[in-house]
Amino acid sequence: MKRCPTCNQIFEDEWLTFCTVDGSPLIDTGALYQPPTVVVPPPVVTQQDMGQQSSAEVAPADYRPPPQSVPSTWQPPPPPRTVAGPSQSLAVWSMVLGLVSMTLGWCCSFGLLTAPVAIVLGIVALSQIKSQPNRYTGKPLAITGIVSGGLYFVVLAVIILIYGLGILLSGLHRL
């Protein structure tokens, strides 16, 4: 059992260390602590009251201590500092632009703009990750951006090669 020395409130929970009312440190009183008993003197009975009721009918009044208004000095602790996580924005943008070049880049050769940007951002992100690994992360994302941007150019070169061979062979066939 624990007791608050300021407001004399008793707490049964052993894990509490501060009073929930006023924030004072609790005092460990042990299991043998008995709350103080308040002795109320019997009411004074006059002769006039004696004639109306017997002394056995007069019961002591229940004593309730007046409520104490203790100003609370306890304040909650400040919230913990938020630690910013490592940055991986360049690596994410590299991956996004690489995947856009592989999927939407074939429309109007839009990939000719997004694939080189994805490759450059991926290389910059990898160099940042290598130089400051505690500040920058996202190595797999940067590699995905570089590979997908490069793969766009490889597939584009294969398509141009196939069309070029087709044009060349059709020109030889006409001779």
Image (cartoon, grey):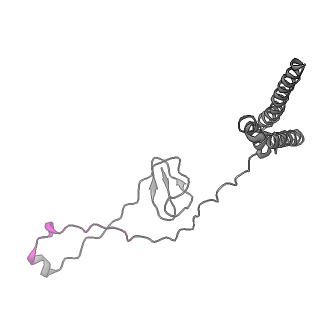
Locate the C terminus by quadrant: top right
Q: Is residue 128 left or right of residue 46?
A: right
Give me the residue at 45% from left, 52% from top. Answer: 33
Q: Position of residue 80 (x, y in %)?
A: 67, 54
101 lies above or below 45: above
Q: Is residue 43 left or right of residue 90?
A: left
Q: Nearer the viewer, residue 140 or 149?
A: 149
Q: Is residue 131 left or right of residue 5?
A: right
- Name the quadrant containing residue 159: top right
Give me the residue at 89% from left, 40% from top. Answer: 127
Which secondary structure class fits the magenta region best? loop
Q: Position of residue 69 (x, y in %)?
A: 45, 72
Q: Position of residue 131 (x, y in %)?
A: 90, 41
Q: Position of residue 163 (x, y in %)?
A: 83, 26
The region drawn magenta spans 51-66
Magenta residue check for 28 = no
**Figure label count:** 0
